[in-house]
Amino acid sequence: MFCAMCGKELPSDLAACPACGALRQPGGSVPKTSVDVAAVAADTRGALAEILRDPVAGLPKFFNKLARRRALEVGIAVALVGTLLVVVGVFMAVPSWARPSNAFFGILLMAVVMFGGLTGSGYAARQVLHGEGSVEGDVFVAAVSLAPISVLVFFAGLVGMGNVELIGAVAMFAFSWTVLMLYSGVTAVSGISERKGPYAVPLMLMLTFWLTSVVTRAIL
């Protein structure tokens, strides 16, 4: 018997799935339920607040509070917010006369590819380096780790590209936080050893930004 929520094998003597925490129906496997938008939004705010207080330890700490399905939902929610920030930020930063006709689609695709690329590279790193995490963890780590970059793009659009020194200072924080949170995620959530983590993080970021640049050049 398998859990209808997350697909994991469900022992017959348990009342709830050990992987995602969903309760079993009296007749058998766990039923699929609709997404609790309010709960996901609350957990998303909680995750961002926790990480803002402690960028390194906050990511795995909050992930471990969530069931696997909820971690996936929160990761997707953070990625959607980040995508919105990137799109709005680029549109504010680049004047209309300088934007190509397909700018909206291109920027949207760029943000999606960046998130998908980091999620995919996290999954690949986990397989190659024998990590013990999950796909839900890959999604959560990728989305939260990219959040500072999304905020940076929005901030650059908000203050204007002429404020180079200010944007540069914020960029130092954004990229540092991304690297630190990604390292924390791949070691504490994805189960990659601390010895291998310093190799996994730069390779994941290089692959992600290379893929994003290729797609962006092809579209815009």
Image: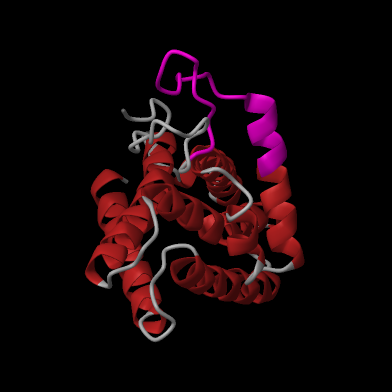
Q: Residue at x 49, y 43 (%)?
A: 68
Find residue 151 and report its horizontal and vertical position in percent.
Answer: 63, 56
Residue 131 left/right relative to 183: left
Is residue 40 depicted above or below 181 in this figure? Answer: above
Q: Which residues are magenta?
A: 20-43
Whether residue 62 is situated above or below residue 66 in the rendered picture:
below
* Residue extending farthest bottom: 195
Q: Is residue 200 above or below residue 107?
A: below
On the image, the x and y values in percent for residue 25 come to 49, 17
Q: How many marks?
A: 0
Task: Give the left or right position of residue 175, taking residue 29 as reference.
Answer: right
Residue 79 image position (x, y, % from top left):
51, 44
| Nearest to the observer: residue 108 or residue 115 | 115
Between 149 and 14, the residue placed more toward the observer is 14
Predominant SS along the magenta part: loop
Can residue 34 be found in the magenta stretch?
yes
Q: Residue at x 38, y 72 (%)?
A: 192
Whole-percent x, y for residue 220 in the image: 32, 46
Give 173 or 6, whichever is nearer the viewer. Answer: 6
Q: Quadrant of residue 11?
A: top left
